[in-house]
Amino acid sequence: MWTRTSDIDRMFGAMDLLRSRLNRLTTDDNRFYGRSPGWSATDGSPRTNFYDNGNQLELKAEVPGMSKEDLTIQIQGNYLEVSGTRKSDAPEGYKVHRTERETASFTRSFTLPSEVNVDKIDASLQNGILSLTLPKAEAAKPKQVSIA
Amino acid sequence: MSETTNITTKEKTVPERSREIPVIAPVVDIFENDDEMLLYADMPGVAKEDITVNIDNGELLISGVRRLPPSGTATREEFGDVEYRRIFSVHQTIDVEKVNAELKDGVLTLHLPKSEASKPRQIEIH
């Protein structure tokens, strides 16, 4: 009964589950350092995701604490440049306990994989995420080829 | 009775195991003056309704879950779904009733006012 491997697997599975539950209970904030969780300018730029939807390209970047006015987006051909400055939130007359959030400016440039329709680019900012939608130029869009 | 009677029924799936998302501690700034403690935490991409702020027994828990809407094929991916979670010890002098939280541009701001009794006070000599 217990000697069957599937039962042993299940037992270990239960133990793993218990361990992960216990880990969550004893969450210790020091455990997480070293993974650089925050926005960081030391390595040059905010973290960015790039997606290809066939007809359009999409860019998402983490820019917490930055408003529309703090960000500049420039495009020339298939060269895209995103730059921004993060201002300090430090209030006057307060004693400082921790400052982990960096204040700096960044510039990050990308070479787009295809030509885009520059006039139809849409940029939005929500909850500290910058989203750019870049529709591909007609010539770069996927086309169906029918067999003659 | 055969040797191989099952004591328990076998389950093919392990219940209650949702897709685990990584948990990371958000970076924070903490300031203090005579009236309050002030905390800023970076939580880009977390919506207001996905944020939990809990103060219990001298412990402040902030948690926010980010779920990115699905997009096309990712050609570059440097961030994903995540739970921002961090626990702080707060002094008993914090007036829990008056704690105020706001979220703007992916930054959570927490005002933790000190109770009247704990504020510094000038004592005059008569």
Image: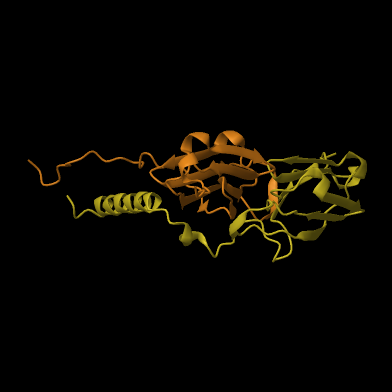
Give the answer, above or below, for where B34 lies relative to A45: above
Q: Give how far across and how far down residue B97 sits, in percent.
A: 48, 34
Q: Give how far across and how far down residue A113 sits, in percent.
A: 82, 55
B64 sits to left or right of B72: left
What residue is drawn where x is 45% and y is 41%?
Answer: B55
Instruction: Single out the residue that lies furthest toward the left.
Output: B1
Inspect this view and state whether residue A112 appears: no
Inspect this view and state whether residue A19 appears: yes
- Taking depth in this image into account, of A47 and A139 the one nearest to the observer is A47
Q: Give how far across and how far down residue A51 sits, in percent.
A: 72, 48
- Taking depth in this image into account, of A104 and A5 the one nearest to the observer is A104
What residue is drawn where x is 85% and y is 50%?
Answer: A73
Count of residue discs:
0
Q: Give how far across and how far down residue A35 sits, in percent.
A: 56, 62
Give the answer, above or below, for where A34 lies relative to A20: below
- Taking depth in this image into account, of B80 and A27 the one nearest to the observer is A27
Tint of chain B = orange
Tint of chain A = yellow
- When asked about the image quadrant of residue B5, the answer is top left
